[in-house]
Image (tube, grey):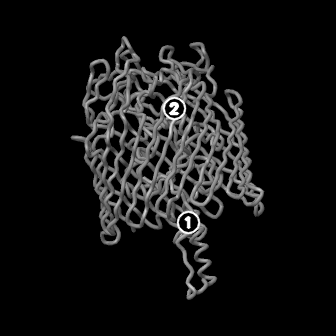
Amino acid sequence: MACCLLISYSTMGQEANDTHTDPNDTLPSIEDLMKIKVALRDEIDKNAVSVAGQKNQLLQEAPSIISVITSEEIKNYGARDISEILRMVPGFEFGTDVEQLTGLSFRGIWVHEGKALIMVNGITINDLGFANNNLIGTIPSAVIERVEIIRGPGSVIYGGYAEAVVINIITKTGANLNGIEGTLSAGAVGKDGWSKLGNLNYGYSAKNLDFSISAGYSNQPLSTRKYSDFYGNSMKLNSDNAYREYWYLIAQGKYKNFSFNYNRSNQNYVGQDGNTDILPLYNNRITENYNNYTEAVSLKQEIPLTKWVNIVPSVDVSHGNVITTALNIHSLGNGEYGFEGGTQLYRYTGRLMTNWDFKKAGQFILGGTFIRDVANVISPTGNPGLQVGPNEGDTAYNAQTDMKSILAEYTNKFDRWGVTVGGRYENTSFGDAFAPRAGVTYMYGKFNAKLLYGNAYRIPIIYQIYSRTTGYSGNIHPETSHSVEFEAGYKFSSHVSARFNVFDINITDPIKFDGLNNTYVNTGRIHSMGAEGEISLHYEHLGGFASGSFAIPGAETSSDLLTSDKKEFLGMPVFKIAGGVFYDLKRLQISPSLVYESAKKGQAGDTLNPTANTQYPAVVLLNCSITYKNIFNKIDLRLTGTNLLDEKYVLTQPYYGMHAPLPAFDRHVSLTLIAKF
């Protein structure tokens, strides 16, 4: 998956050193020049990114290390949902927490619980209770136009959860669709599981209006293999006790300078594996059925005051529940069962951004943001569901946290050099914080480079503070991180490009769960160092990519996140290599790909020696997608297989929590029909 295209606009057509002059050639007409200008503008717009700032920028100029995965690349390599897309991107890995809750790791760091910002069309979709996401089996590629990723801190621009990585999933617009597109898919998972997916997109685009709406449903088991805990219990996973059921509705529109976005997602899943040991059935019924939903709407108006000043006010409102909200009868601990009480979480966001374009004097961004998070919780017994103080009686039905921030950033280009400096100041319910950002970019011919420095911080999440399950954690304070990154890229030709980066990330006072005291605390440090690289090849009917990444912990990293020899992050492979090719025969396209992950170590489950490790072997996940196109000029038929070698992949817990490795990513073969009208 050629995650970043290093674009040199002098290569639109032939390379400069391949051009020649023919005295018989005639000069282009004004009309021809205008066509070239329009084509160039469209190409720039198509390859510009906005995730790293408040305006579109070329990848080489953006003051962040960015990966972009386009719908063409997703289609070429047959990725079926966001988890399969991220699996092909350097640095990403998945792990397990508890109750079949899966999470992300990035650059060796477990970015679960608030260290990764995940958005759909710029709207945060992290669970508002713990800031988590169950990404496996969600957000199908059928709705995705592109995925933009900041490979590092995005706190200056976004604040909140943008501490280690930012992922913005951009869905198809009216111009992308220009009609109706439907997708139906069914497949076999493992030995006896089945997957199914249905999606319908509609898009309309006119002169000043662009509108699209997407809706769909998917269901697949996390695995169909046997899961065994560390206490001698086991269960065969299947479509009943390991399902991932997902519904979604996404709409977006733009009329002149006004735009809106709406999304609603709903996921049901099972967590019978429990926190440590498998939970027994209750009257032969599964007790750990969970539901998580999020719903959000965003409104934005661009107001051009002059040719060089633009004001952009926006409002976002979102609500949902805690990601582990029970659907039915549920274990309350100590052998007791009850029904989950009502949980409602809200986020209200208001922004006012101003963009000042001084042309040769540079660009300046100044803005402010207000965010209020609110929790309304009733316990399973009907009592107040929040613990708002250290004493047993300090309970409440409601709690809230506030954040007010000011952002300022200046960017300018000096011939081959670009400079960005800026910062974000926040006043929060947990004190004040400041995150600076600085970057230098360099472009010369086919070569480009970046040197970047950034701070980030993340305030405690509302359920980490006030949950009665974990107890009051009012003494915790924001965690902070410091990152240094360097990237170099080279465009060998109009078809071949490569880039390489090194990074050093240091998180101080990370917020972690203290199992001994059943509460959240600031403790220790997380230090990750490593490198990532990729090369891409793209012709009209042939292309490919290869990428690699590795991450190792620094000496300061807390031992509870490391293997017993202190040389690796617990539960995460040191090396990851991905690659693929596609060959397009007009009506038939063949796209094999693979992901290699080195051996990783997880907790051995020895209660007498809890930091003892077990090594899990390296895996090679071989995939292949075959597409027969343009049946009746309207239908594509795609056969996709992932993990064709049937590797016994497991999700390991990246801390010493006594949860055994959880099977996932079984062999999956599916047939997909895509129709366009």
Disc 1 element: helix
Q: Nearer the viewer, mark 1 or mark 2?
A: 1
Whether residue 531 sits left or right of residue 581 in the image: it is right
Whether residue 606 sits left or right of residue 376 in the image: it is left
Q: Position of residue 611 (x, y in %)?
A: 41, 17
Question: Is 21 situated above or below 332?
Answer: below
Question: Is 415 situated above or below 320?
Answer: below
Dots 1 and 2: beta carbons under 8 Å? no
- Of 448 and 466, nearer the camera is 448
According to the picture, the residue beneath numbered tag 2 turns out to be: 113
Q: Residue at x 60, y 17 (%)?
A: 394
- Of 297 and 188, nearer the camera is 188
State the image quarter where residue 639 is shown. bottom left
Q: For the residue carrying disc 1, how many other residues have a C-alpha within 10 Å: few (<14), some (14-19), or many (20+)? A: some
Disc 1 residue type (three-letter)? Glu
Q: Residue furthest left?
A: 191
Quarter containing the C terminus: bottom left
State the image quarter where residue 162 is shown. top right
Q: Position of residue 287 (x, y in %)?
A: 34, 27
According to the picture, the residue beneath numbered tag 1 turns out to be: 43
Q: Residue at x 36, y 30 (%)?
A: 271
- The label on residue 74 is none
Q: Position of residue 337 (x, y in %)?
A: 37, 21
Q: Is residue 663 visible?
A: yes
Q: Is residue 348 visible?
A: no
Q: Residue at x 43, y 61 (%)?
A: 538
Disc 2 residue type (three-letter)? Glu
Q: Residue furthest bottom?
A: 24
Q: Residue at x 32, y 43 (%)?
A: 621
Disc 2 element: loop
Sequence-earlier tag: 1 or 2:
1
